[in-house]
Image (tube, rainbow, N blue to C red):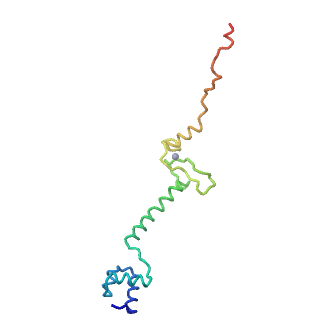
Amino acid sequence: MSWTPEKIELLTSLWNQGWTTARIGEELGVGKNAVVGKAHRLGLPKRPSPIQRRTEDSSETKKAPAAKVLSKGISIYDLGPGMCRWPFGDPGDDDFHFCGKKNIQGKPYCDEHCAAAYLNGKSPREDNPRNHNHGGPNNKR
Ligand SMILES: [Zn+2]
């Protein structure tokens, strides 16, 4: 079996169309290995299998938007009733966003951020030891 220019052209064309090597071999009347070997010698690009390409594409399109939402959080435009209004970052920053979790009924924040707000606002404990009543002057009696 000799590779005529016509056959080489046909091989290249079918290869680029994504035909399997076995199918191209049938078309040209040669074995699959001859097709692979000739394609290699011609320097034809390796084709990713259609199945692999499809799974890669779908996983990329699924992952990308989800990651964006996570890093961005909830913008003020997305913030609706029943969502935690706890702010993250500086309002002037591009990545400024809100928590956006389900809030506690009657409160502007989710349970986690209600707890945080309570901790920040509470007064320091009065456990100063000097407040103890020693009854100093009474000892002299
Ligand atoms: Zn929150």
Image spot of residue 59 (x, y percent): 42, 64
Q: Which residue is drawn at 45% across and 82% down?
A: 43
Instruction: State left or right for residue 6 relative to residue 126.
Output: left
Question: Does 39 appear above or below 65?
Answer: below
Instruction: State left or right for residue 31 relative to residue 123.
Output: left
Image spot of residue 16 (x, y percent): 41, 82
Question: Does 102 appear above or below 72?
Answer: above
Q: How many labels does the image show?
A: 0
Q: Name which quarter of the figure residue 9 lies in.
A: bottom left
Instruction: State left or right for residue 99 relative to residue 6.
Output: right
Q: Looking at the image, which is closer to me, 56 or 118?
A: 56
Quadrant holding the N terminus: bottom left
Image spot of residue 63 (x, y percent): 45, 61
Q: Which residue is drawn at 36% across and 80% down?
A: 19
Q: Which residue lies furthest to the top in this view?
A: 141
Q: Looking at the image, which is closer to me, 132 or 14?
A: 14
Question: Does 118 appear above or below 24?
Answer: above
Image spot of residue 68 (x, y percent): 51, 59
Quadrant holding the C terminus: top right
